[in-house]
Image (spheres, grey):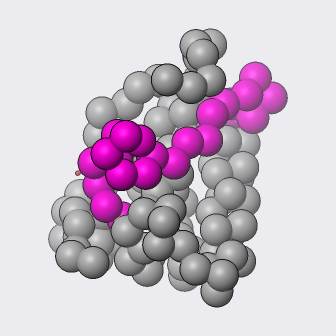
Amino acid sequence: MSETLFTKIIRRELPADIVYEDDEILAFRDINPQAPVHVLIVPKIEIATVNDIQPEHAELIGKMVLVAQKVAKQEAIADDGYRLAINCNRHGCQIVFHLHIHLIGGKQLRGSAA
Ligand code: DGP
């Protein structure tokens, strides 16, 4: 896949408001937040879309969900609740082709799908 701006954020070539980092995962605030809390959880390796996830990525994907859980607690939205979303390709409205989970919360969300 071609490199996206998320790789530049991971390499610190672009600024971002980082809320969590470990060896495999970075989480930073979305530049265009849809709610008071809107964080993107991003693997450091380049996986373009959900379609590109392989069986060997299963542990990493699980860790991304655990990071989402941790950041939700950190942001004090865990008890009220939040949404985790992954957009895939055109119909899913994916814009950045580097896999990421949206963690959205901090207000009452509407609907659960399109
Ligand atoms: P998606 O549609 O799932 O590909 O969402 C991409 C998200 O990435 C979108 O909500 C806006 C966010 N985004 C795009 N460019 C930047 C950036 O340069 N910095 C940050 N923090 N977020 C960005």
Residue for point 63% across, 63% down: 64
Question: How many numbered markers are drawn?
Answer: 0
Residue for point 55% across, 42% down: 85
Label the magenta part by its dominant secondary structure: loop
* Whole-percent x, y for residue 72 in the image: 67, 42
Q: Residue 78 magenta-drawn?
A: yes
Residue for point 36% across, 51% down: 89
22 and 113: which one is in front? 113
The answer to whether residue 51 is seen in the rendering is yes
* Whole-percent x, y for residue 21 in the image: 52, 68
Residue 24 shown left or right of residue 81 in the figure: left
In the rendered view of the protein, which quadrant contains the N terminus?
A: bottom left
Residue 108 shown left or right of residue 86 in the figure: right
* Whole-percent x, y for residue 24 in the image: 54, 78
Residue 71 shown left or right of residue 53 in the figure: right
111 and 72: which one is in front? 111
Which region of the structure is painted magenta? 74-98
42 and 75: which one is in front? 42
- Please tell me whether residue 34 is drawn above or below residue 92 in the rendered image: above
Residue for point 23% across, 58% down: 15
